[in-house]
Image (cartoon, rainbow, N blue to C red):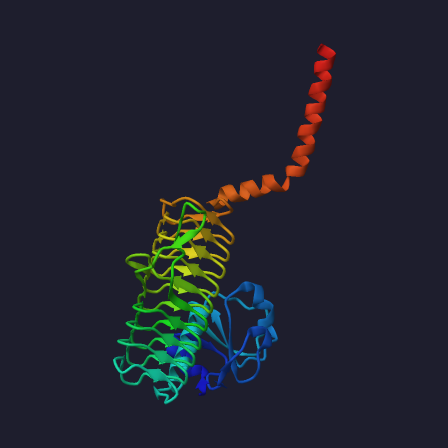
Amino acid sequence: MEFTAQQIADFLGGEIQGNPSVKVSDFSKIEDGKPGTLSFLSNPKYSQYIYESQASIILVNKDFQPEKAILATIIRVTDAYQSLALLMSLVEQSKPKKTGISTLAFISDSAEIAENAYIAPFVYVGEKVTIGKNTRIYANCSIEDGAKIGESSTLYSGVKVYNDCVIGNNCILHSGAVIGSDGFGFAPTEDGTYKKIPQMGNAVLEDNVEIGANSIVDRATLGSTIIRKGVKIDNLVQIAHNVEVGENTVIAAQTGISGSTKLGKQCILAGQVGLAGHIHIADGTIFGAQAGVANSVKIPNQTLQGSPAISLMNFHKSAIVHKNLPELQRLVYSMQKRIDELEKKLN
């Protein structure tokens, strides 16, 4: 599809500088801009590229002040990154959607598939499964008995949804995601072995949740592991049994959340964060990369870093001390040597 600069500006409520009739049919990075594409500038680190970019249209923030002439047509908007997301969503929604059930899929007689759903080849749909309208399930997915999937959700190839789990509307599950695998529950016995504790609950994903590739949401021992609406989970994330993740929380790759931990709303967990089990995290908490969290966070809207996680300001102070440890060690040894010499003289 082609769009003119004028059409894009009207859609975004932006201001055009340049040719309003120029057309684009694709997107490009600003440093690799090509004619006929639209790019954007939101991070000042990339400002140098805007003056040589061959992109036909570039979105910029309203407060951007160029240092020299720009070849492209500029559209000034309130937030260039958000505007790009809106345009990309518009293009994605305009693409034709697959519908129909492949004859190579296995669908249980008791399953209920709503209108306009798409079931690809080699999908397994178990007994008493319900799948909402406009939902798309790609090849080699497995939807086990009693599972429920809402409307307009997408399950990419190889997703596994265990029995009795629930996925809401407008969810996206990327390849290799597993919803409802057993929680890590084992009871030690007198002979040193471990007895498996049956995991009798399920996993529930509310509306507008996205789960990255090869991420896991374990089922609860009893009750439900719950991912609240609007949560975005990156690739390679482990969510353990009976965890609850609050609305609009974002979790980056290689993070692990131990059993029965409760996260508040609008938290941010950077890469490789680790949370201990049975703790509570207040709304709006931000954990920097590789933070290790052993205790509950009761005060909302804090930024924590380090292992064990401490306030960002204290972490920066500690980092300075840590960097100077070799010199501090030499100073301590030197002072100890002088003290020993003074004690010998006094004696």
Instruction: Provide residue 250's location: percent of width, then percent of height.
Output: 41, 60
Which of the 4 quarters of the picture holds residue 158? bottom left
Instruction: Provide residue 154's location: percent of width, then percent of height.
Output: 37, 76
Which is more toward the observer, 28 or 217? Answer: 217
Instruction: Provide residue 142's location: percent of width, then percent of height.
Output: 38, 75
Which is more toward the observer, 248 or 62? Answer: 248
Residue 338 is left or right of residue 192, and the answer is right
Instruction: Provide residue 26's location: percent of width, then percent of height.
Output: 50, 83
Please state, as top left, top right, bottom left or bottom right, where the C terminus lies in the image: top right
Q: Residue at x 34, y 73 (%)?
A: 144
Res 10 visible: no
Residue 126 is left or right of residue 73, and the answer is left
Q: Is residue 11 above or below residue 206?
A: below
Q: Is residue 117 above or below residue 277?
A: below
Residue 201 is left or right of residue 72, and the answer is left
Which is more toward the observer, 86 or 7? Answer: 86
Q: Residue at x 40, y 51 (%)?
A: 285
